[in-house]
Image (spheres, rainbow, N blue to C red):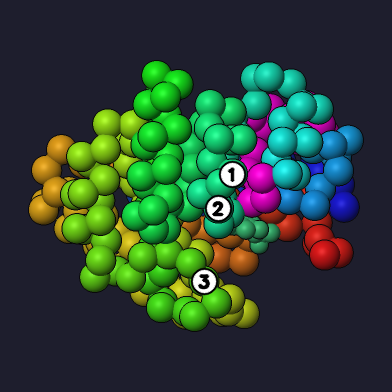
Amino acid sequence: MDVVKNLRRLQERIVAAAMRAGRNPGEIKLVAVTKTVPVEKIKEALDCGVNRLGENRVQEFLNKYQQLPPGVEWHFIGHLQTNKVNKIIGKVHLIHSLDRWELAEELHQAAIKRGQVAKVLVQVNVAGEKSKYGLAPSETVDFVASAAGLAGLSVEGLMTIAPWSANPEEVRPVFRQLKDIARKVEDRAPGSKMDYLSMGMSGDWEVAVEEGANILRIGTAVFGERDV
Ligand SMILES: *Cc1c(COP(=O)(O)O)cnc(C)c1O
């Protein structure tokens, strides 16, 4: 797989999808998901101007953080254990996977200790899949309202992982629902800013763009199939 070609094509398609949806392509951020991808291949993407990288495992993130240039904007997109918070805080730009109160408190405390504010998205398990982490839609408004009281945290939006489907049309309602939840949060949890909707992966990102995604997390369509 040719990373440069994949990226060029993907970027063109993102612009086209945004225009079709009547949106400004400039407001859609691509996070290239680099899990299992070797550093040499990631560098090809950086050479093409990609600057946002996403990892879902702490140790793998730390290895790559050391090996790649300091200008990279890192996104942590996986389930995060509370005892690993200190390893990544201050190194990642945005954590997409705040999925429980215990983690909110841990992130808050770790950030305060460093005199920082941790930027996070709240992960919502829209489809209620047993295999996935995330808050239930019905819990999300109250959760964000409470998190707004933690000075070390800045909740900047919501994230979801749609169920796998060969037909992306089938997951359109999932994306639409995440946007509806974000609207409810804005109405009922004053002061919380829902700037970002992180939704859409290689198989379903075009539908996500049509439904308002402004952060896409895309791995396979850039780097090819993962063997693990
Ligand atoms: C792996 C992963 C992605 C990217 O998936 P692709 O289908 O390879 O684009 C996006 N989000 C999360 C949370 C992931 O773990």
- Crowding at dot 1, Cα within 10 Å, few <14 / some 14-19 / many 20+, comes out as few
Identify the secondary structure beneath mark 1.
helix
Instruction: Please report the residue visible at 20 percent of the width from the left and 39 percent of the height from the top.
Output: 149
At label 3, which amino acid type do we have? Lys
Indicate which label's residue lies in the foreground, 1 or 3: 1
Question: Alpha-carbon distance for marks 2 and 1?
Answer: 6 Å
Determine if the C-beta at disc 3 is less than 8 A from ligand 1. Answer: no
Eyeballing the image, is 8 above or below 205? above
Ligand 1 neighbours mark 2 (CB distance < 8 Å):
no
Q: If you read the primary sequence from the N terminus, does the residue marked by circle 1 or circle 3 appear first?
A: 1
Q: Nearer the viewer, mark 2 or mark 3?
A: 2
Q: Is residue 125 left or right of residue 193?
A: right
Which residue is drawn at the image coordinates 65% and 26% (left, top)?
72
Q: Please give left or right for residue 114 compared with residue 205 in the image.
A: left
- What's the magenta region? 43-58
Residue 54 inside the magenta-drawn segment: yes
Residue 48 spot, x, y in % from top left: 74, 30
- On the image, numbered disc 3 is attached to which residue? 132
> What residue would you read off at disc 1?
84
Toward the viewer: 154 or 29?
154
